[in-house]
Structure formats: C-alpha cells, structure tokens
Image: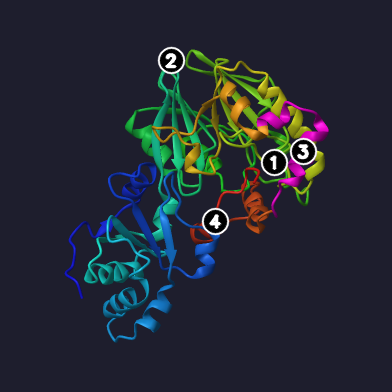
Amino acid sequence: MTSTRRGPSEWGPAELQRALLSPGESPLFVLDVRNREEYEAWKIEGRFGPETLNAPYFEILERGGKDDMVDSVAAFVESELSAKLPREGTVLAVCAKGGTSEYVAEGLRRSGYSAANLSGGTKAWADYHEAKVVVDGPTQVLQLSRPARGCLSYLAVGGDGNATAIDPLRDPSPMNILLTERGLTLERVIDTHAHADHISGGPALAKERGAPYYLHPFDAVHPFDLVPGDLEFLNLCDQMSIRIGESRLEVMHVPGHTLGNCALLLDGQVLFSGDTIFVASISRPDLGGRAEAWARLHYRSVRRLSELPDETLVLPGHFASYRELDAQGAARAKLGDLKQGNPGVALALGSEEEFVNGILDGLNAIPESYVEIKRVNAGLAQAHDERASELEIGKNECALA
C-alpha cells in the first residue's frame, strides 16, 4: 500500500462549482458511490467534465471484504479501481448526503490518491446557490443560479433601492440574504410562468416580505386537469408596464411553454426570457400535455421575441449545460448571436410547419414529477422539504432535447 497523499479532506459546493467552471491545473475526477439508479438519473456535470465513475457503496463494502469500512474501501480501490482512477488531480468522493463518501475518501487517501469528500453530498450540491451581477446600469440585475439544476432567478434593483424578484427558486433564503445585505425593499415578485421543473419560491417570498405576487392568470390553472389553482396573485398581462426606479419593465405574453408564459423587457434592452428562449435551445411546449397545439403558439412567441433588436441581452430562466455559461459563469447572450447559434430560434425563423414538426420530433417523455410540481405551484398540493427535494431531483428537462 502506497503512502497517503495529503490535501483538503472536504470540499463544499462552492469549491465544486469553481472546479466545474474551470479545469485548473489538474482535472477533477468524481467517484460517485450512490446507487446506480440515482447516478443514472442525475450526475455532477460541468463545462470541462468532470470524468465520473459510479461504484455503489454497498458493492464496495461487499467486494472489499474487510471488517473495517475504510479498509474495505482501500482494498476495493486497489483491486478493482486502480486502473480507472487518476493518480494526478483530485478524486472527489460523492454520495447522497456526504456520510458514506467520507469513508470512501479516507480509503482513497490510504491507497495514495489525493482525495476529498463532497460535504453534504449531492443534496448539498442540489441546494447550492450563487449570485452575480449580470447587468450593471441604472437598474442593476443580479442572476441567482442553482447550478446543479440549471435554474435561474433574478433580482432587478432600481436606483431608489426598490427591487423586483423574477422567478424566485424554492428556497427564498438566497434572495432574502441579498435583499437584507444590500438594504433593499422588495417591491414585487413576478413568476414568468407556472414552473414545472422546480417549486416556485415566489408566493412564499412575497408573503414573507409583504410584497405583491404577479402571475399570468392562464397559469393559475393546472394544465392537466384544468382545476383552478389556490393562489393569491395580481394579473400579469400583455403590454403591462411596471416601473423599477427610473426603468420600465414591459410584459410580453408569449404562450407556448405554458399558456400564461411571459417575457419581461427591461428598458427595451434586457429580456428576461423566462422559459421561452435559452442560450443553446428553446423551451418545450408539451409540459401541459398539448404538444402540437402549444407548439403553434410557441412558434409565434419565439418569432415575436426574435424581432427584438439584435443587441437585446437575453437572460434565460434555465441552462441545461455549463457550455451555455460565459467566462464569468453567467447565462446570458445577445439575441443576434442566438439567431445564428441557437437551433430553436433559427427554426422559428422558418415556416410554422417546419417549426412544429421539428419540435415534435425532439420531445422526450414528460418527467412524472413535473405534473406534481405544477400542482404544488398552483397551490393545489403541498410538499414538505424532503418531498420537494425528491420532486426536484434529476436533470432539468424544460428545454428541447
């Protein structure tokens, strides 16, 4: 057995995010010890990898054959993984909550690898949020990202210290921290649509801060069974103008992803596209169970947005891959660039029939959890923290494949 290499024994989600955004001097390798089903449903991915290997923990212990757990890990690594794990760089041991992977990381170090444990496991990674300024002008815009899920929300801050929250994520604490640290007053909360991939934090944040909550009324109905929702909200409507400091936010009703889907145009220059246009794709129109009918609505909506000036900065509601992030780790792009490089936008510049046929050919099965998430977001069901995490787990599938 080789000597133990020394190095940081624990990584937090912030350290993992830095490694996923940049390859650094030596690459990251992930040894994921969750069950195979969990691993196949959702794994850690970044701009430059990382390379990953799945070895379920119970198999490691069984085939390691030692009485001591760490000894079993070391024995398994040396007998079955030595040809698969890199001797350079960090091997990050990952499990669901960070407990069993701690033993795996120790066993890797006993076998001579530079290994660390992901503290809190994939649960901590799934719950990690970060914020960055993406527009610095009279109205400053902060993008709040939940990178494990590719979910994005925004805080638009006027010069008067009043702020508008757009598409808040389930956990309102990151938004609350920003508001408190900056001494801001939350003037309103807007959901661009009824989300399917994650539970909205909009109603809870609005209630906590005493601010009004806005939603298009078409999205206050569950689309599968047409049951009216149980929500308190003010109506978003097409061409509605909302003041943020000295700026104006224009509401554009762009149905297709949902019947009430809206985009928000700030001073004619910055487009909060919600779930209409992403950096590398567009959204899918089948999450209400009416793919062809909504695809035709979607065609007109994407075309409407594509007619905005090419210099319009698009801030999407999601990203599906780290390749959609810029050098600063933000999801944003000029509309003119998307017309050239985004296949979905380019498809909308053609005929309606070509668009609809192309969309229908690119649809995957609707994730079962999305139906229940829409019920929660309509106020028709409740989900405690553990159940909410279960519903949200997995790869974001709001974009076309």
Q: Nearer the viewer, mark 2 or mark 1?
A: 2
Q: Nearer the viewer, mark 3 or mark 2?
A: 3
Residue type of the residue flagged with mark 2: Pro
Q: Earlier in the sequence, mark 3 or mark 2?
A: 2
Mark 2–mark 1 distance (CA, rounded to whole Å): 33 Å
Q: Earlier in the sequence, mark 1 or mark 4?
A: 1
Figure check: 102 above or below 189: below
Tags 2 and 4 touching, CB below 8 Å: no
Taking the image as shown, residue 344 lies to the left or right of residue 78, namely right
Q: Secondary structure at mark 2?
A: loop
Q: Nearer the viewer, mark 2 or mark 4?
A: 4
Residue 348 among those drawn in magenta: yes
Mark 4–mark 3 distance (CA, rounded to whole Å): 25 Å
Residue linked to disc 1: 220
Q: Nearer the viewer, mark 1 or mark 3?
A: 3
Residue 144 among those drawn in magenta: no
Residue found 52% across the figure and 37% down from its top: 206
Residue type of the residue flagged with mark 1: Ala
Residue linked to disc 2: 138
Within 10 Å of disc 4 (Cα), the crowding (few <14, some 14-19, many 20+) is: many
Tags 1 and 3 touching, CB below 8 Å: no
Residue linked to disc 4: 394
Residue 352: give x, y in percent of width and height.
81, 31
Tags 1 and 4 touching, CB below 8 Å: no
Highlighted range, magenta: 345-365
Residue 288: give x, y in percent of width and height.
74, 46
Mark 3–mark 2 distance (CA, rounded to whole Å): 37 Å
User: Is any atom of residue 294 visible in this view?
Assistant: no
Mark 1–mark 3 distance (CA, rounded to whole Å): 20 Å
Residue linked to disc 3: 295
